[in-house]
Amino acid sequence: MWLPCPLPRLPKDVLKRAFEVGVVPEEKSRAASYFQLDHSVVSKAVQGTFGDKVEIMSTKEALEKHDWLRDYWWKIVQVDSDKYTSAAETNWDQGYFIRILEDQKVTIPLQACLFVSTDNLNQNVHNVVICEPGAEAQLITGCTVHSNVHRGLHVGVSEFYVKERAKLTFTMIHGWAQDFDTRPRTAALIEDNAVFVSNYMCFKPVKSLQMYPVAYCRGRDSRVSFRSIIYGSGNSYIDTGAKVVLQGEGSRGEVVARAIATDNARIYARGFLQGEHEHSKAHLECRGLLLSDKAMIHAIPELMAKAQGSELSHEAAVGKIAEEQVYYLMARGFSEGEAEALIVRGFMDVSIFGLPKELETSVQKMIGITAERVL
Amino acid sequence: MPENILEIKDLSVEVSGRRILEDVSLDIPEGEVHILFGPNGSGKSSLIMAVLGFPLYKVTSGEIWFKGKDITYLPTNERVGMGIGVAFQNPPAIRGVKLGGIVDCLAPDKGKIDDLVGKMKFPSEFLLRDVNLGFSGGEIKKSEILQVLAQGGDFVMLDEPDSGVDVENLQLVGKVIHEMLTDRSALIITHLGHILRYVNADRAHVLIGNTVACSGEPVKILGQILNEGYAWCMTCPKLGKPRQEQGISPLH
C-alpha cells in the first residue's frame, strides 16, 4: 500500500523508471498528472493555471462524482471480450479518469503513470478519457515496472471519447520486464470533425504483450491515426495491431507501424481497416526490420470494405538491413557497425509521432541507447 | 612530376561471378582532375564502387593504390578515411536518417555547413529530410556534393554530377564543383560532358567494353565522341573483337 505523495518526493528508483516512459516529476512541465503505484493512487494533480480546464482523478473517484460517467463505462470496450477484460471488472483497481472541458486547449501535455512496484502483482486498471467538444490535449501515458519486478500482469482497459471538433493525441510508452505479461484493451470513439492520434512505443523486452486497439470513426470527417514503434528483443512475444472502423462520411484513418525484432523475439504486426461508409479512406503501412535469424516478424494487414467507394490500401515490407544503405554510409566514413546503428535508429524515427520537443529528445536518447545495444 | 594520388593497376572485378571490369589501368597524379567517359553499362560506376571497396565488387586480379598505399583489400570506411570522397549517381534512400544528421557527423564545424548550405541554395529544412527520400534529380546532386564537401577528402569521385539536373542547378553545381576542385584531385564520370564547362580537366579516359580503351585530352575526346558516338570507339584497335559484338549503341 502506497500513501499519497507529491511526484518529486517519490523514491528515486521509481522516478527513474517513470522518466524512461515519459513521465516527469516537475509539475510545471505537465498540465496534470496521475500516478498509480500497484493498486494505489499516489498522486493526481492539475497544475494551477489548468484548474478550470482539466479534471484528473482515479476512475473510482470519478464514478462517485459523476453519475453520467456510467454512460462511458464499458461502452466501447466490451467487458465480456476476454478473460482480461473480465478480470479488469472483477478485480478492478483504479485507473485514471481525465476530462478536458469544452473548448479548452491544453497547451502542455498531461501525463499518467501506471507503475508496478511489487513482483508478481496483477494490476487491473480501467481508464476513461473524455475530450469534450472543441477541446485539445496531448496525453502521455507511461506504463512500467520497478527494476526489482520480474513477473506480473498488467491489464489496462482504456476508453477514449473524442467529441466534436476535439483533438486528442495519446502517446503511450511501455517499459516492461522479460517475464512480465501485459494486456491493454483499448477503444476510441471519434465524433464529427474530431481527431484522435495514438502513438505507441515499446523498446524493452516483455514476456508477452498483446493488444489490438480499435478506433470507431463514427463522426463526419472524423480522423484517426495509429502510429507505433516496437523494438522486440530477448524472448519477447509481441502481438500488436490497430483496427480502424470508418463509419462516418469523410472519415479517414491511418495505421503506421514499425517493428524491429532481434534475439529470439517474435512480433505479429497486425492492422485492420474496415470501411463502412462510401466516402471514407484509410491506409495501413507496416515496415519490419529483422535483425536476427532466430527472431520473427509476421505482418498481417487486413482490409475489409463494406461500402462501395471506401478506399482502403496497405503496404507492408519486412526484411533485413539493406546492404546498399550500409555501403552508402560506409562511403561516408562510418564503420559497418556505426552505419547499421544509424539505419536502425533511423528506422525508429520518432519524428513520425510529432511529440513535444522535450519528450522527443528523451525518447530519441533512449532509442540511441537501444540502437547501439543492438549491434 | 607529381606523385599519383590514385593508381589502378590491371584491375579486374566481378559482381556475382560476372566480370564487369577487365584489366583496367588508370593513374591520377596528385592535383589533377580526370574525366571518365563511356557508354551506359561500360563499367564507369562499377569502377567507383571498386575503388571504394564495396564488398559486392570482387577484385579478381590487379591492385588499387591510394596515396602510395595498397588499399585493394581495405574496408570502405578505412579507404574513405584516407581522404576519398564520393558523390553517387543513384544513392539509396534511408528512412529516418536525416541528411543533416549525416553532415553533422562528417563535419562538426557547424559554420562551414551553414556556409555550404547557403552557397548551394538549400532551404534550411532540407537538412531535416530523410536522406535521398523523394529527392529530385537536382536535390540528389546537391546533397551528394554537400556530403563530399563535409567529408573533406582530398580526392573526390563524382558520378555524373551533371545528369538529371536543370540548367540553373547545373550552373550552381558546376560552380561549387569548380571551387571544390581548386585544391583536390578528382575522377569525374560524365556522359555528355556538360561539367567540362565548369572544370578544368587534365585528362580523360574512355571506358568501353569493361576496359580503358584510350586516354587523352578531355575536350578532344569529348568532341570525337559527340561527333562519332561510341561506335567510333568500338573500332579502336585496343579493343579485341569479341567486345565489338556486344552491340553498344552510339550516343546519338
Image (tube, grey):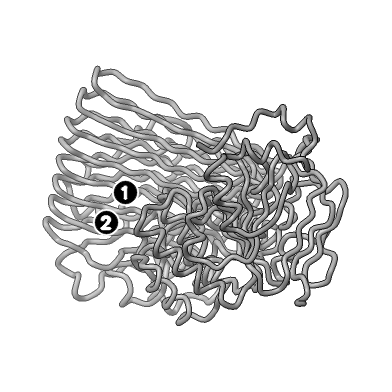
Percent x, y of residue A170: 34, 53
- Toward which corner of the image does residue B251 lie, by quadrant? top right
Q: Residue at x 41, y 52 (%)?
A: B165
Considering the image in quadrants, where does the N terminus of chain B appear? Answer: bottom right
How would you rate the neighbour count of disc 2 (Cα within 10 Å): few for under 14, some for 14-19, many for 20 or more? Answer: many
Chain of the residue under label 2: A
- Disc 2 marks a residue whose amino acid type is Ile
* Relative to B129, residue B116 above or below: below
Residue at disc 2, secondary structure: strand
Of the two numbered discs 1 and 2 on the same chain, state the one appearing first in sequence.
Answer: 2
Residue B46's tag is: none
Residue at disc 1, secondary structure: strand
Q: Determine which residue is flagged by label 1.
A: A197
Q: Give the label, 1 or 2, closer to the camera.
A: 1
Q: Determine which residue is flagged by label 2.
A: A98
Residue A39 seen in the current view = no
Front residue (pair A133, A314): A314
How would you rate the neighbour count of disc 1 (Cα within 10 Å): few for under 14, some for 14-19, many for 20 or more? Answer: some
* Relative to B26, residue B245 above or below: above
Q: Is residue A361 left or right of residue B210?
A: left
* Relative to B103, residue A69 above or below: above
Chain of the residue under label 1: A
Q: Residue furthest right?
A: B61
Front residue (pair B64, A111): B64
Q: Residue at x 20, y 57 (%)?
A: A136
Q: Residue at x 56, y 58 (%)?
A: B219
Residue A289 seen in the current view = yes
Q: Is residue B12 left or right of residue A89?
A: right
Front residue (pair A39, B157): B157
Percent x, y of residue B146: 49, 67
- Disc 1 marks a residue whose amino acid type is Val
Q: Is residue A11 left or right of residue A79?
A: right
